[in-house]
Image: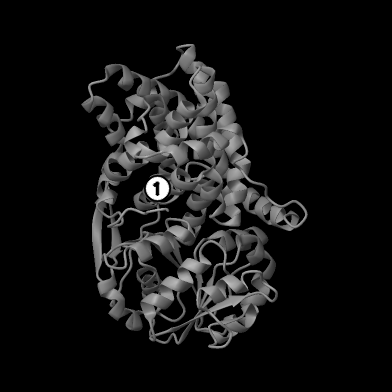
Amino acid sequence: MEALDFDTAVFDKEYVALGDRREAVVRGGRHLFDRLPAAFEGVGQIGVIGWGSQGPAQAQNLRDSLGDAVKVVVGLREGSLSRDSARAAGFTEEDGSLGEMLEVVAASDMVLLLISDAALAENYADIFTALRPGTTLGLSHGFLLGHLTDTGERFPQDVDVIAVCPKGMGPSVRALYVQGSTVNGAGINASFAVEQDVTGRAVERALGWSVALGAPFTFQTTLRSEYLSDLTGERAMLLGGVHGIVESLYRRYRDEKMSEDDAFRHSVESVTGPLSRIISKDGLIGVYERLADEDKDKDKEVFAEAYSAAYPVGLELTAEIYDEVSSGNEIRSVILAGKRLDRFPMGRVDQADMWRVGQSVRAARETDAEVPLDPFTAGVFCGVMMAQADLLLERGHPYSEIANESVIEAVDSLNPYMHARGVAYMVDNCSTTARLGARKWAPRFDYLLTQRAYPAVDDKTVDRSPFEAFEGHVLHQVLEVCSRMRPSVDIFVE
């Protein structure tokens, strides 16, 4: 793993011990907003380009945090259907806070590229041409680096290139910022990276960007490490994996003669309710300890069997996804899919029977206390989650990144939306790249769990070695530390 550290004169750096490593972080909070002008020294205008998943949240959070210190302008392509939405959020042509994309790029000292990855691949050459020397180019995802690497190209050498990557979809970034307006430290954690620093101000601007978004803690990574873990995570545990897991579990419980409502409660509701809450506060080991606290030896055994059966499936598929991402195949597939979307738009992902059942279950839910902590569901979910963490650990990612991309983003940002609104809302409020990945890989998780993991449990041929490594796993200590750095309020989805 590449050794990481940074220096900052504006913010206070501190170190956290994660496993056998030490990582530098910056603690955020609204009390730091008065430091933002120093962080953005030399920046008179920030251009937020795009109005997809991240654009609305980041533009509004930056505007609210910076006040009059730095002008925030939204740039959209000519004819963009998002103009009315941007105007409704208070960005208008009349006051100069809404304009044409390339004009905003040329006029801004810091340009945040938040358009879709497919649009980036189509427009980056024009955007690079419009950038002025000394500009800071900001990304919230490393996809463009992957594309440039694949095509043998580079970022312009006369601009800073930084990234701030919130560990949640755009609506979460905005919701926690607003919900925590009176609670210091409320927001979505983020990672930051510096790819190029030609001004000598890249680190401060990246940290200022993250603090202004409301991130309680900001972790360091590299742009390459971020896109490898992020693209892999959203195709695996964060979106595609959890979708495939609950689809397979629902059918299994129906085959076991559970009613439709109970099958949904024991699969989806169990994951998005008690499982997510326990993992958020107490980690994966907390789930097993909860079963142990209730002195249910049978449940502990069910968890261990399900965990051991699901772990190999999670490891195999996460390894395949990671290789597809690192080779450039997954990036190329996203670009090709983007070119087909006008002709073949993405359909909904909630039309199976279980999701229609889910509508009535959610409508009838009075309290989360009625949702069961199903030990089999818990074992499958935790097994796949730990497998992703192990694969990223094997590939040398920072512990903080592994925890965020495998666990924290799922339970603190994404799953609450599925709990409140269903799978389509959770998936389709993410980026186009994430939506494409979830649709592509969810069926693979569903298939392998159904064809290999569950038959091994039923035939009593499960290899228990994955569970034997579970209780002493380093991820438990990492998550224990990270739990103390979680948002100071829980996200609330109406």
Along the line of sight, the residue nearer the viewer: 78 or 493: 493
**Secondary structure found at label 1:** helix
Task: Note whether 222 is above or below 368 in the view shown.
Answer: below
Q: Which residue is mark 1?
A: 402
Relative to 345, is 182 above or below? below
Q: How many marks?
A: 1
Q: Give the percent coordinates (x, y) of residue 332.
A: 67, 53
Q: Position of residue 61 (x, y in %)?
A: 42, 71
Q: Nearer the viewer, residue 436 or 197?
A: 436
Amino acid type at circle 1 is: Ile
Q: Within the image, what quadrant is residue 96 found in? A: bottom right
Residue 206: image location, x then y, percent: 40, 71
* Residue at 66% across, 74% down: 77
Mark yes or no: residue 9 visible.
Answer: yes
On screen, residue 144 above or below 77: above
The colour mode here is one colour
Who is closer to the viewer here, 153 or 454? 454
x and y percentages locating residue 48 in the rendered image: 52, 74
Seen at 35% across and 33% down, the residue is 370
Residue toward you, 222 or 330: 330
Q: Residue furthest right?
A: 343
Q: Is residue 224 left or right of residue 478?
A: right
- Tell me if mark 1 has few (under 14), some (14-19) or many (20+) residues whose alpha carbon lies within 10 angstroms of its own: many
Residue 316 showing in the rendered view: no
